[in-house]
Image: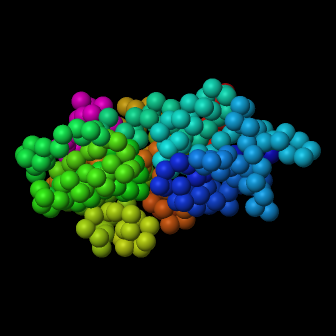
Amino acid sequence: MKKNIAIIMGGYSSEYKISLKSGNVVYKYLNKDLYSGYRIHILKDKWVYVDSNEKEHPVNRHDFTVQLSDEKLTFDCIFNAIHGSPGEDGFMQAYFKLLEIPQTSCDHYQAALTFNKRDLLSVLRPYGVLSAASYYLNLGDAIDEEKIVAKVGLPCFVKANKSGSSFGISKVYKKSELKAAIRKAYKEDNEILIESFLDGTEVSVGVIKYQGETKVLPITEIVTESDFFDYEAKYEGKSKEITPARISKIQQENVSRIAQQAYDILKMKGFSRSEFIFKGDTPFMLEMNTTPGLTEESILPEQAREAGISLKELFQNAIEEALIENK
């Protein structure tokens, strides 16, 4: 008998349109011999099942079911395709844990930790995972430009601490540009991370649980026309993503080891995609994403294809791993 899979997509953040695209790709490539897929839009104003005729049916949030005219629809597993809140920051993971419904992403603590860039890097630092020099601000804090520049130097990056897809990020070259960049970041989050600029090759490393084992996927090199890997570079064709990356064997070994180490230290499950910049042969971590983009053009699916894993196999494995974990 086919299992019912709820593909949750959308979310409450600026990334909701990207998430809808990812979710529809999961729906398209789901193994129809094994699963019946259902597109569930999780949006600020509604939670709905969108059927094949684009008709919306409300989701009962008490038990995550959908009442159709002749039946009550329940789900065997949740495929999480929400980028940003509430799918990448732990809220949906905790909700499904309470309902005892298996879901494909990591647990709620790991999601909350990795979604908070500065907390993630602080937790991994004692294990030898290097990151750029940084300065933290919370909304309402005094902005001491002299102290910021003394700590991180120029140029530097001003980032929303809990935001994806490069929303709210600026590269700052002059001290006089700091306040405007900080205001921009505060539009996305009330916490800010300001980091020193690392001049080197940027790579993205996918790590997944595949057939019961932690697997590091082929590495992707990021080459952007923009000044950095911003939203336009990621989603509007202003970058090249080269898989496998044009890096040395020692660089490949170093970054693969660190990416897998981080995945294992954090007791991760499901997908992760971590970003690094090399200084010489040494990788410095920028962040980890736990619900990365899943469109045909996205980095992690591209890495899976390079490893000989089709989208159909990638998504099926994620579901089967979640079901095994819940037994």
- Residue 232 as seen in the image, left or right of residue 180: right
| Residue numbers of the magenta segment | 120-136
Does residue 120 appear anywhere in the picture?
yes
- Picture coordinates of residue 85 (x, y %)? 50, 44
Q: Is residue 142 above or below residue 32?
A: above
Percent of width and height locating residue 122: 27, 33
Snapshot quadrant of residue 80: top right
* Residue drawn at x 26%, y 45% as measured from the top left: 193
Magenta span includes 213: no
Residue at image coords 71%, 31%: 62
Residue pushed farthest right?
A: 70
122 is within the stretch colored magenta: yes
Give x and y (percent) for residue 101.
67, 32
Q: Is residue 314 above or below residue 109?
A: below
Position of the C terminus, as image quadrant, is top right
Residue 256 in sight from this viewpoint:
no
In front here: 170 or 44? 44
All told, the count of numbered labels is 0
| Residue located at (34% from left, 55% from top) | 168
Does 154 sit left or right of 107 as displayed? Answer: left
Q: Nearer the viewer, residue 294 or 98?
A: 98
Quarter holding the N terminus?
Answer: top right
Q: Nearer the viewer, residue 326 or 143?
A: 143
